[in-house]
Amino acid sequence: MRDILINPNVRDFLTSLADGDLNIATEFVWIIIATALSMVGGAIGGMLLAGKDIGYQFSAMLGALFAPAGVIPAILLGLAVLNLLTNY
């Protein structure tokens, strides 16, 4: 594990991720993180909304599948706006 963190490429990537620099690699990481968090939130929301009606597992699965449909375009638009604001 220590060898991975000492690698200059990994260190530069983690530094740019922590500093808030927007490049293609950090944007992909933020999209993956946002998608995973939206899936968790969608599963919880699905269980709260329709758990008793259609079952907790099925509603969690549907919520986890439908939540990224609204989050991914919003994240892409937000990253594009942030990229424009940091360049000007």
Image (tube, rainbow, N blue to C red):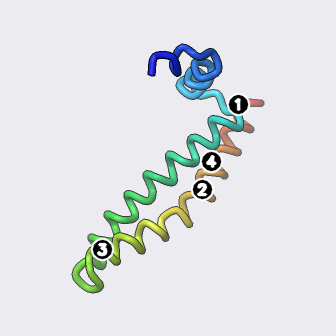
Amino acid found under the numbered disc labelled 2: Ala
Q: Residue 20, image x and y in percent?
A: 58, 28
Counting residues from the N terminus, which is met first, the one under dot 2 or under dot 3? 3
Left or right: 48 in relation to 61: left
Quarter location, residue 6: top right
Q: Secondary structure at mark 4?
A: helix
* Viewer-closest of 41 and 65: 65
Mark closer to the chain start, 1 or 2: 2
Image: 12 above or below 73: above
Seen at 38% across and 57% down, the residue is 40
Find disc 3 in the rendering and name its residue.
57
The image quarter containing residue 11 is top right
Few, some or many residues within 10 Å of mark 1 (<14, 14–19, 20+): few
Rounded to the nearest angstrom, the CA distance separating label 4 from label 3 is 32 Å
The residue lying at 64 percent from left, 21 percent from top is 9
Amino acid type of the residue that numbered disc 1 sits on in the rendered structure: Thr
Query: Which residue is located at x 29 percent, y 85 percent?
Result: 54
Q: Gap between marks 3 and 1, in whole Å?
A: 42 Å
Residue furthest toward the right? Answer: 88
**Residue type highlighted by circle 3:** Gln
What secondary structure is found at the residue carrying circle 2? helix
Q: Which residue is mark 1?
A: 86
